[in-house]
Every structure is written in structure tokens, then in C-alpha cells.
Image (cartoon, rainbow, N blue to C red):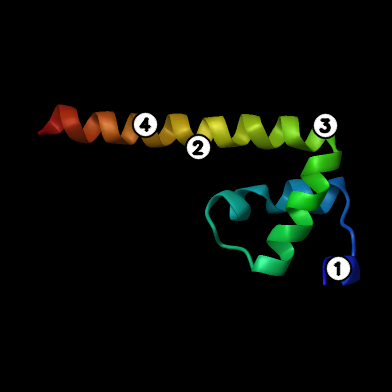
């Protein structure tokens, strides 16, 4: 089945990263993005930076909840 999936490029991968991180993406598209990330150092670097910013934003919101309690 994987062989029948159309490969995607950097622009489509980068445009879908936020949806990917929010788990708002169909499984077949998710696989295509993952396949692209495995072979593209530029996109994986951007993905890691974006993922870290999401984690930092999440950690900040949790810290605010603890401080307010």
C-alpha cells in the first residue's frame, strides 16, 4: 500500500506540520509526511523546531495553571 502513495515535497510537508502536531490529519497523509521527513534534513529540522515550540507553549500554559492554584 505504501508504494501507491504519491510522494509529497517540502512545501506540502511544511504546510501540514501544525495539523500533524495537533493530530488533525488523515492517516494516509500522515504517512506521506513521515516518509518525507525521514529523507529531508531541512524539513525534519523545521519540524523539530516547531514541535519544541509547541512543547514550550504547552509547558508555559501548565505552569500558569499551577501558579494560579
* Marker disc for residue 27: none
Upstream in sequence: badge 1 or badge 3: 1
* Spatial separation of the CA atoms under disc 1 and disc 4: 36 Å
Residue position marked by numbered label 2 in the rendering: 54
Residue 35, given in percent of the width and then of the height, sits at 80, 51
User: Is disc 1 placed on a helix, strand or loop?
Assistant: loop
Nearest-to-viewer mark from 3 and 4: 3
Q: Label 4 crowding class (10 Å Cα cut-off): few <14, some 14-19, many 20+?
A: few
Q: Quadrant of the N terminus?
A: bottom right
The reply to whether callout 1 and callout 3 are in contact (CB within 8 Å) is no
* Spatial separation of the CA atoms under disc 3 and disc 4: 27 Å
User: Is disc 2 placed on a helix, strand or loop?
Assistant: helix
User: Is disc 4 placed on a helix, strand or loop?
Assistant: helix
Could you tell me which residue is drawn at 74 percent across and 50 percent down? Answer: 34
Residue position marked by numbered label 3 in the rendering: 41
Upstream in sequence: badge 2 or badge 1: 1
Upstream in sequence: badge 4 or badge 2: 2
Upstream in sequence: badge 1 or badge 4: 1
Q: Label 3 crowding class (10 Å Cα cut-off): few <14, some 14-19, many 20+?
A: few
Nearest-to-viewer mark from 2 and 1: 1
Nearest-to-viewer mark from 1 and 4: 1
Upstream in sequence: badge 3 or badge 2: 3
Residue 26 in the figure: left or right of residue 40: left
Residue position marked by numbered label 4 in the rendering: 59
Residue position marked by numbered label 1 in the rendering: 5
Could you tell me which residue is drawn at 87 percent across and 56 percent down? Answer: 8
> How many numbered marks does the figure carry?
4
* Spatial separation of the CA atoms under disc 4 and disc 2: 9 Å
* Spatial separation of the CA atoms under disc 2 and disc 1: 29 Å
Residue 19, given in percent of the width and then of the height, sits at 60, 55
Residue 18, given in percent of the width and then of the height, sits at 61, 49
Residue 63 in the figure: left or right of residue 32: left
Amino acid at each position: 500500500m505504501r508504494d501507491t502513495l504519491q510522494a509529497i515535497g517540502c512545501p506540502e510537508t511544511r504546510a501540514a506540520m501544525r495539523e500533524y502536531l495537533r493530530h488533525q490529519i488523515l492517516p494516509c497523509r500522515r504517512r506521506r509526511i513521515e516518509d518525507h521527513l525521514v529523507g529531508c534534513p531541512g524539513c525534519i529540522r523545521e519540524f523539530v523546531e516547531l514541535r519544541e515550540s509547541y512543547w514550550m507553549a504547552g509547558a508555559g500554559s501548565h505552569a500558569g495553571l499551577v501558579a494560579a492554584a
